[in-house]
Image (spheres, rainbow, N blue to C red):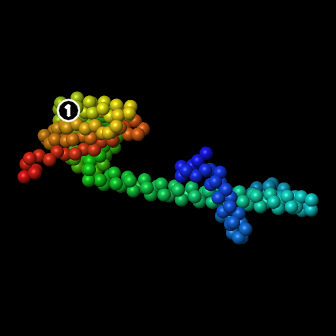
Amino acid sequence: MEDTHGKSNAGNHERLRRSARDLIDHGVPPPNHSGTLSVDALQLLYQRASKPESAADALKLLHELQTYQVELDLLYEQLQANEHEISEELAYYKSLYELAPAAYLIVANDGDIIDGNQAAGVLFDESAQPLIGKPLQALLAPGQEGAVNALLRKTKEQDSGTKGAASVSVELPDLRRLTITASSAVSGDCVLIILTEAVTDSARS
């Protein structure tokens, strides 16, 4: 079996075991993130260590327990580092989404808005938060519902194997033209949308 980095779990465990033994052999005490031995376990080890015939086995068992302890501590530290790295990446991509100059929406398959960034709020002349829960069609000029429904159907076909994104041109209540480019999310339970305002002839001049 392999982990997400393509290395075998057996290989990772062996490297962890070597690191733990190196720490113990060099006299580094375990950080004790994962707890200590119980009183009963310590008493049993003491009893075995007190008898000459079982002292060697007791010391060997103690060393194994110390090794397992350090392995758990190293694994705990690695999990903490991974969690911190994932949190930083999530915050980074979240800021890219929220502060992007392009208007982004995430809508359910029925067209209701799940999320939107700041640029989307500016495009529709309201903050991004009140957009949540509204049907996308409600933000457009009357008569655009058919075009939006057709777009959502195309994105659903993408989920069945069609490549690329679908797009449609619609009109806003203030007569601005808008291009909606959409693609189905990998999970298939929502649609990712980019909104691009069309440049009119007057704007070009």
Q: Residue at x 32, y 34 (%)?
A: 155
Identify residue for label 1: 144
Left or right: 17, with 180 as reference point: right
Q: x, y percentage for residue 12?
A: 62, 54
State the residue in front, 177 or 181: 181
Q: Residue at x 27, y 30 (%)?
A: 149
Q: Residue at x 57, y 49 (%)?
A: 3
Q: x, y percentage for residue 61?
A: 80, 57
Question: Under tag 1, what secondary structure?
Answer: loop
Decide: few, some or many residues near mark 1? Use Cα within 10 Å; few <14, some 14-19, many ≥20: some
Left or right: 199, with 30 as reference point: left
Please state which amino acid type lies under the numbered disc 1: Gln
Res 42 visible: no
Q: x, y percentage for residue 73?
A: 64, 59
Res 170 visible: yes
State the residue in front, 96 or 12: 12
Left or right: 174, with 14 as reference point: left
Q: Quadrant of residue 92?
A: bottom left
